[in-house]
Amino acid sequence: MTRQVTELAAAEGLTYDLERAVSVNTIDAHRLSHLAAAHGLGDRMHERLLRAHLCEGETVDDPDTLVRLGAEVGVPEDEARRMLDGDEYADAVQADFREARGYGATGVPFFVLNRAYGLSGAQPADTFRTALRTAHADAAQATR
């Protein structure tokens, strides 16, 4: 599976190094993403965390690493450290997890289309095209 994901990523121009990726509890990384979103940096933080984990072999549950990664995208270090020392955004992360399970997510990657369809795993582009067309058609039908 690791080889397949790496090959799919390479086909899209991404360089994954999953041999170096360390599986960790990502709750604090998700909390950091919420803090970043409060600063308008949610997308940048998400991308930075993914690159750190999947490509660079960073340990994304280490508080010092998370503070550094947050700072790289513009999250104030003092806010990130204070958040990590407490439980801020923990409820929001748990709500995200509940919502994902409601869509059928049991692992990552998992994609939600139009808040109606779940697509599990790293899939070929054709699978995404078909799912996107279906979601689009259903949304168009619902607005008629």
Image (spheres, helix red, strand yellow):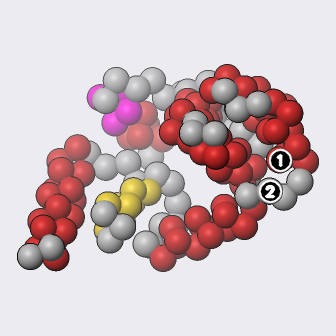
Q: Residue placed farthest to the front in the image?
A: 39
Left or right placement of residue 130 versus residue 118 in this view: left
| Residue 105, above or below 69 | below
User: What SS does tag 2 mark?
Assistant: loop
The residue that appears at 21% across and 64% down in the rendered structure is: 135
Magenta residue check for 94: no
Q: Which amino acid does label 2 sit on?
A: Glu
| Residue 136, above or below 95 | above
The reply to whether the C-beta atoms of the residues labelled 1 and 2 are less than 8 Å apart is yes
**Can you give x and y, in whole percent of width and height, for residue 91 in the image?**
72, 67
- The residue under label 1 is 83
The disc, 1 or 2, on the residue closer to the chain's N-terminal end is 1
Q: What residue type is labelled 1?
A: Met
The residue that appears at 77% across and 43% down in the rendered structure is: 61
- Dividing the picture into quadrants, the one containing residue 52 is top right
**Can you give x and y, in whole percent of width and height, for residue 105 in the image?**
48, 67
The residue that appears at 40% across and 26% down in the rendered structure is: 14
| Residue 33, above or below 14 | below
- Dividing the picture into quadrants, the one containing residue 74 is top right
* Secondary structure that dominates the magenta span: helix
Left or right placement of residue 30 versus residue 7 in this view: right
Which stretch did the figure color magenta? 7-11
Q: Between 62 and 16, which is closer to the camera in this rendering? A: 62
Which numbered circle lies on residue 88?
Answer: 2
- Within 10 Å of disc 1 (Cα), the crowding (few <14, some 14-19, many 20+) is some
Left or right placement of residue 26 versus residue 18 in this view: right
- Dividing the picture into quadrants, the one containing residue 7 is top left
